[in-house]
Amino acid sequence: VPVSSDKFWMLTKNKAWTLPSPFDNKGNYVISLSQLVRWMSVKAEELGVEVYPGFAASEILYDENQIVAGVATNDVGIAKDGSKRETFQPGVELRGRITLLAEGCRGSLSENIITNHKLRESGQGQHQTYALGIKEVWEIEEGKHKPGSVVHTVGWPLDMKTYGGSFLYHLDDRQLAIGLVVALNYRNPFLSPYDEFQKFKQHPAIRTLLEGGTVLQYGARTLNEGGFQSIPNPVFPGGAIIGCSAGFLNVPKIKGSHTAMKSALY
């Protein structure tokens, strides 16, 4: 859906103050990332790329010179007690001249590579910081739906010492994506990002939009929040770390998928 409006609000408990938007989404589209990657996987396979859905990379493979030579996937079909089920399938070794790790935020193999090859030290990258984003997809009433409308907010329900903000994206078919991102370095030990999200949905400007609607989907994910100064040296013998595994998320512009795709292209 083409972006039709782009608003930025500062929330207090009962008010929504419009501020100049730090974003420029003119000419952009509101899309479903899951639909995009499914479409991309089909296009990739048409070009001869092999895609292995459902298999996680569980181990880094090295050659005799300790240069990364690929990855091994995990075994599947193992019961809780460790026994092999009828559906057992052993992992396989995937070897290549170059290995690119794109595991998303704090990928386990990527973190092992960063530590073992001292990539933070060689790249002078500071420690990484993280946030938790909670998201829901709603189906709202027809009269409240504005296809392409984009809203970002800061402020309430988070206090002045807690970094974070929210987003509302109007999709097609009366659907609305809504979420709250909370930095995980919050000082209040009793703060719950999930509960803060529930409070956020009770704000008068948000509640009016959601009333009469239905939740279709929900989920959560972590985000790299350290920014440019937290990027390690992304290159190691035999490959490189790309995307959010390297921390390429542009925090002020909230561009993570964009920078991940660019890092893969270039």
Image (cartoon, rainbow, N blue to C red):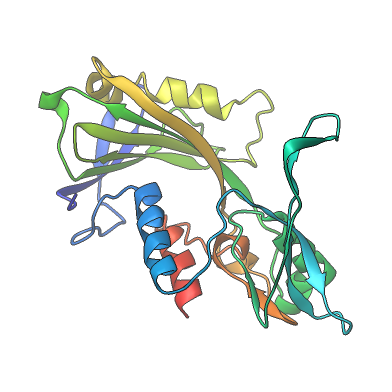
The answer to which of 143 and 79 lies nearer the viewer is: 79
Q: Position of residue 143 (x, y in %)?
A: 10, 25
Q: Position of residue 151 (x, y in %)?
A: 27, 42
Is residue 234 something that shows in the picture?
no
In the displayed image of the protein, which residue is found farthest to the right?
64
The answer to which of 53 and 66 lies nearer the viewer is: 53
As drawn, 61 above or below 203: below
In the displayed image of the protein, which residue is found farthest to the left?
143
Q: In the image, 80: left or right of 3?
A: right
The residue depicted at 19 percent of the width and 49 percent of the height is: 1
In the displayed image of the protein, which residue is found farthest to the top?
212
Image quadrant of residue 156?
top left
Q: In the image, 40: left or right of 162?
A: left
Q: Position of residue 57 (x, y in %)?
A: 69, 57
The residue depicted at 52 percent of the width and 42 percent of the height is: 163
The residue depicted at 50 percent of the width and 73 percent of the height is: 263
Q: How many numbered callouts?
A: 0
The answer to which of 263 and 250 lies nearer the viewer is: 263
